[in-house]
Amino acid sequence: MPGLYIVPTPIGNLGDITLRAIDVLREVDFILAEDTRTTSVLLKHLGIEKRLYSHHKFNEHATVGMVAEAIAAGHTVALVSDAGTPGISDPGFLLVRTCVEAGIEVETLPGATACIPALVQSGFPCDRFCFEGFLPQKKGRNKRLQELRDEERTMIFYESPYRVVKCLEQFAEVFGADREVSVTREISKKFEQTVRSTVSEAAEYFRQHEPRGEFVIVLAGKPKRNRKEEDEEQ
């Protein structure tokens, strides 16, 4: 059927792609890719030859109109990011919103994403959680952390290897050095690793072991006070 198909791609192990995702990539008229070079490698692995067009944060405002018009004319289009599910800390939201507003069918396939495996294997409560993705690098970063100080749900953050130590140091300042954290890197890849400790211990670990790969930081929520603590405070 004509429409936009959101297709998750593997975040590491190429075997994580679903059979349905492969079928969609084979059948659509063309594919929008965050980086055509990265997607070309995946398509070659899958034995798929398909027209690729760039769709990333620097050109998405200029391309969404063209894509919507192509779909309205009867084409089928798949959107992929370099890894994981488009729209989750990756380009995708603007195109989806444009298609929805134009009455164009949008279908999102289930599939790979980094935040859920990291959350589940953290050992922290995952019945309720909040996804923060990448924090602002400079302006607004401290303000956002202060807003999360009293968050009782498990929190999920994405971070680059170049800022992970600084990020953990900031967590220690805002949430307390003893707050529990689970830091996972390179999910589904050969050197996948999870460090479970306090925030201060995790920061020290990655000071001594050079951070490499993509990181997901799962932070325990603020401990709920019991009735005795509340009575004593009053």
Image (cartoon, rainbow, N blue to C red):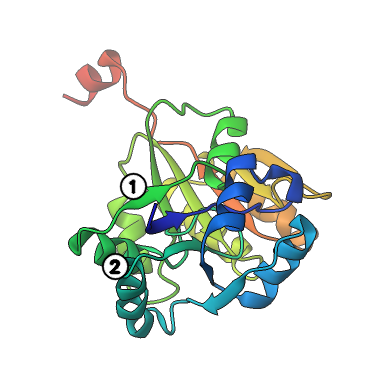
Closer to us: 88 or 51? 51
Q: Position of residue 156 (x, y in %)?
A: 47, 46
Badge 1: how crowded within 10 Å, few (<14), some, or many (20+)? some
Closer to us: 102 or 132? 102
Badge 2: how crowded within 10 Å, few (<14), some, or many (20+)? some
Query: Which image quadrant for residue 18?
Result: top right
Q: Amino acid at mark 1?
A: Arg
Q: Amino acid at mark 2?
A: Ala
Residue at which label 2 appears: 72
Q: Nearer the viewer, mark 2 or mark 1?
A: 2
Q: Which residue ends up furthest to the left in the rendered image? A: 234
**Measuring 27% from the left and 63% from the top, which residue is drawn there?**
99
Residue at which label 1 appears: 149
Query: Which image quadrant for residue 188?
Result: top right
Residue 222 in sight: yes
Q: Position of residue 103 (x, y in %)?
A: 20, 58
